[in-house]
Amino acid sequence: MKKKYLPLIIAAGLITFFSACKTETGFKTLIITGQNNHNWKVSSPILKQILDQTGLFSSEIMITPDKGGDMKIFNPDFSKYKLVVIDYNGDSWSEKTNSAFVDYVKNGGGVVIYHAADNSFPAWKEYNEMTGLGGWGDRNQKDGPYIYYKNGQLVTDTSAGNGGSHGKRRAYLVKTRVADHPILRGLPVAWLHGTDELYSQLRGPAKNMQILATAFSDSTLGGGTMRDEPMLMTITYGKGRIFHTVMGHADEGGGPAMQCVGFITTLQRGAEWAVTGEVTQRVPWDFPSAAGVVLRPDFKEMTLEEAFTHIANYDIVKSTKSLSFIQAHLRSLAGDAAGIKKIEEMMVKVLKDKDATVESKKLLLRELSWMGSDYSVPTIKELVSNAELKDEAEFALTRLVSK
Ligand code: ZN
């Protein structure tokens, strides 16, 4: 009897081993590019960086043959991947590759459709069912209805006309339509997106599709439809989940459309949802509101260490970004004594730093007055003798000692 169980135990051991590897390296992700009417040499490495820095994904970029090249040699083994990101708008793939991709999605593979990827493959029925909506490529009423919101109502519009347009580039407000969807949960219901094309008049089969967010295409701003156009969508196809973002037109260095924290965050969250159906990522501290665009020129969220380096050089006339970051961090640490202690230690380090500005020390004394502990008291006491900091130091001491 004992022997009989042995292979099972080994099999269980192997499964654990492989799943441990997976969590260490992240979900294996394939970014497909190589042909596009956009600068894919800029966009694809940025997509890879945005995904990989979450720690959830491990991406590789696969480049197809050039336009007019032999597509038979483009034959990825999709089964190796949990997620496929399409940054491609070009020649048809081979029948074999198309059917392998359809099988991958049907069997539960995750997909991200990014920007002009919804222009691609107008004649490939299954692909258009995965994107839900598409534009250009001679798309018209034969390809499905226009889908948009008008006066708060979802409209399925079967009227004749071409699919796909965008007016002059602009920053625009993105509005949440499904606030409790895992991808959007916790995000503001409206936020300003960095200057981008506002895709409009998309049309397609729109089967099993949910519109998560829209933007108003205002014709007075250089071309528009006066409709609320779909910006973020989810589609299911077989067992597969697809996240479709029409945003992120790539300029040199990514430009405001890709550097926008709203674009970055929704892409990261949409990609996770496409793989697992859930989102575990926290909302970043710098997520934009309706009041203004927030860009990350290097695509990364600031770290606590960077915020403290910046704050030591704090200048009242410059940005309060670092202080906001530290404050947001503190709020997120509610109840986490060890985490708060770590920040207190970093604050005291700045207070002791001879090169740190007076303004930075004033700010930190104000913060410490409510969140500090006995640990800060000796350092603050020393600052009482500093004429420039006396008031703030005494104020902090009074609050800390009476705690
Ligand atoms: Zn574009």
Image (cartoon, helix red, strand yellow):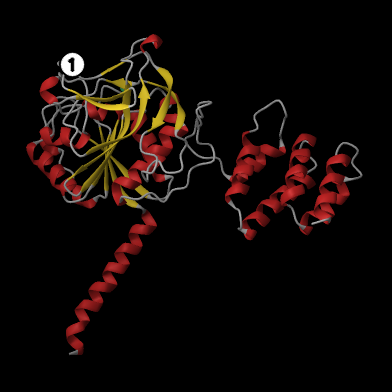
In the rendered image, is residue 15 in sight? yes
Q: The disc labelled 1 sits on which kind of residue?
A: Asn
The one of 261 and 179 positioned closer to us in this rendering: 179
Q: Is residue 267 left or right of residue 354?
A: left
Q: Which element carries disc 1, helix, strand or loop?
A: loop
- Quadrant in which the N terminus is drawn: bottom left
* Quadrant the C terminus occupies: bottom right
Q: Quadrant of residue 385?
A: top right
Residue for badge 1: 162
The image quarter in which residue 387 lies: top right
Asked whether, in this view, residue 293 is left or right of residue 263, the answer is right
Seen as rendered, the residue at the extreme left is 95
Q: Is residue 254 visible?
A: no
Q: Is residue 272 above or below residue 172?
A: below
- Give coordinates of residue 341: x percent, y percent: 68, 56
Q: Residue furthest bottom?
A: 1
Question: In percent of the image, x 41 and y 51: which residue is there?
Answer: 280
Where is residue 267? Give x, y as percent: 37, 38
Residue 88: x and y in percent read: 24, 31
Q: How many marks?
A: 1
Q: Residue at x 42, y 50 (%)?
A: 55
